[in-house]
């Protein structure tokens, strides 16, 4: 039986902040958000409201993999909620559990997905010793199942991407992840993408207004990096500001693509502020490498690729078992991320050796190496 709960307090949704509607179901308070569809279920009421497979005591210690992305505030006790990724057989869901009061927050559709995943895991022997009797479950013993093994398995069993993605890859040669889901909407990654786009169009507008090439170089010379300036201790701030400018729309779109393919997982693992720190510091160090190795120090350098290369390096350290889809001679292949990045490094080294002066090869290579190093030291702050 469901009835309106006689509670005076109105809780705000952990996801969107909208006032939630409280109900009593089987004697347990359930708060629901009518805006985003999220639900907060008090401890002890998950089994009766969602199904006993969704009870944290059933899957948390066995399948649960703590994540380190956006943290939610529990609407019930204001404690910090921990996100747990629950993966099995190529599928995954992330739910939020309050370590203080034990409440479970489920986004729209997460309850059904959680039950489906955990139920399948149980049918395949993941919960030896657990019973089906509601309220009489024994604590499941940890099976031989391994989250890392699940990652490896998913890389070889996930279906090929749809036709539009295949066509996109045929014409661009861009990589597509096989399977590496994220917990959150990657707000920092998306925001950084928007900022880069806004700065690009504003700078293009200024360029049109300034008229002559001399005026353009005079104004943007204060923001784009010139190795000769850095070597003489001038305009050192451009080691950071050069990251936010691009030479053209193709340059911008290419960087934005790699930022969103690899950056969202780094953000999800390390958190938004650390993600941005990796981007900026890798870009700065990439600028230093470019300054040292650039043949003509009077040529200006601009573009976010040094910082994005740092995110790629961190990605490689944090997710070494991921594979990416690539298209060779119109055929789809799964390529281990190590092979992909290895090829990427060789292309950059070859470009530098052959003297391609229009691309900042060492900003890429220096940024990637910096990101690898940062990822190595930050990996324990993740998962």
Image: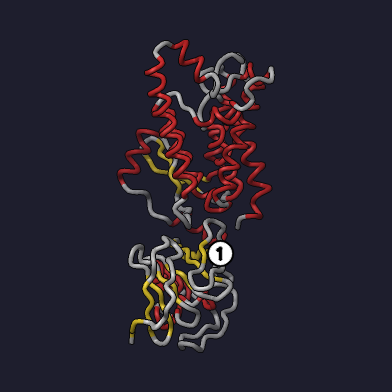
Q: Nearer the viewer, residue 233 or 67?
A: 233
Q: Position of residue 327 (x, y in %)?
A: 40, 39
Helix or strand or loop: what does disc 1 sit on?
Answer: strand
Give above or below for 223 relative to 5.
above
Describe the colour scheme in one phrase.
Answer: secondary structure
The crowding category of the residue bearing disc 1, from other C-alpha atoms within 10 Å (few below 14, some 14 to 19, many at least 20), is some
Q: Which residue is located at x 56 percent, y 52 percent?
A: 271
Q: Position of residue 164 (x, y in %)?
A: 30, 43
Give above or below for 198 relative to 118.
above
The N terminus: image quadrant: bottom left
Q: Nearer the viewer, residue 250 or 332?
A: 250
Instruction: Give the residue furthest to the front.
Output: 8
Q: Which residue is located at x 49 percent, y 82 percent?
A: 44
| Residue at numbered disc 1 | 65
> In this rendering, would 162 be left or right of 148?
left
Q: Which residue is located at x 44 percent, y 57 percent?
A: 157
Q: Position of residue 187 (x, y in %)?
A: 46, 49
Number of marks in picture: 1
> In this rendering, would 173 be left or right of 126?
left
Task: Tell me if residue 66 can be seen.
Answer: yes
Give above or below for 382 relative to 357.
below
Q: Nearer the viewer, residue 202 or 246?
A: 202
Q: Position of residue 218 (x, y in %)?
A: 51, 15
Give above or below for 98 relative to 276.
below
The C terminus: image quadrant: bottom right
Task: Tell me if residue 356 can be seen.
Answer: no
């Amino acid at each position: 039986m469901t009835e309106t709960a006689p509670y005076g307090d109105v809780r705000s949704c952990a996801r969107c902040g909208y006032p939630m509607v409280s109900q009593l179901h089987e004697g347990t308070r359930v708060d629901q958000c009518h805006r985003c569809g999220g639900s907060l279920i008090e401890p002890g009421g998950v089994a009766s409201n969602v199904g006993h497979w969704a009870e944290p005591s059933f899957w948390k210690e066995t399948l649960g993999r703590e994540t380190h992305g956006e943290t939610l505030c529990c609407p019930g006790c204001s404690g910090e909620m921990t996100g747990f990724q629950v993966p099995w057989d190529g599928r995954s869901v992330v739910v939020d559990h309050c370590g203080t009061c034990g409440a479970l927050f489920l986004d729209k559709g997460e309850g059904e997905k959680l039950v489906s995943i955990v139920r399948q895991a149980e049918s395949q022997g993941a919960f030896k010793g657990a019973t089906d009797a509601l309220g009489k479950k024994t604590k499941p013993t940890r099976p031989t199942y391994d989250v890392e093994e699940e990652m490896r398995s998913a890389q070889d069993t996930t279906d090929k991407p749809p036709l539009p993605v295949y066509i996109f890859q045929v014409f661009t040669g861009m990589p597509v992840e096989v399977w590496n889901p994220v917990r959150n909407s990657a707000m920092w990654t998306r925001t950084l993408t928007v900022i880069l786009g806004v700065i690009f169009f504003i700078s293009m507008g200024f360029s049109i207004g300034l008229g002559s090439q001399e005026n353009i170089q005079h104004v943007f010379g204060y923001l784009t990096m010139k190795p000769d300036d850095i070597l003489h201790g001038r305009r050192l701030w451009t080691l950071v500001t050069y990251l936010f400018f691009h030479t053209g729309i193709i340059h911008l779109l290419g960087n934005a693509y790699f930022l969103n393919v690899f950056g969202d997982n780094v953000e999800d693992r390390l958190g938004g502020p650390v993600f941005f720190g990796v981007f900026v510091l890798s870009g700065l160090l990439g600028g230093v490498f470019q300054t040292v190795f650039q043949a003509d120090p009077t040529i200006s350098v601009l573009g976010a690729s040094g910082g994005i290369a740092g995110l790629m390096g961190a990605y490689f350290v944090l997710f070494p078992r991921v594979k990416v889809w690539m298209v060779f001679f119109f055929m789809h292949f799964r390529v281990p991320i190590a092979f992909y990045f290895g090829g990427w490094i060789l292309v950059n080294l070859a470009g530098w050796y052959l003297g391609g002066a229009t691309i900042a090869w060492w900003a890429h290579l220096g940024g990637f190496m910096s990101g690898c190093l940062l990822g190595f030291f930050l990996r324990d702050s993740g998962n």
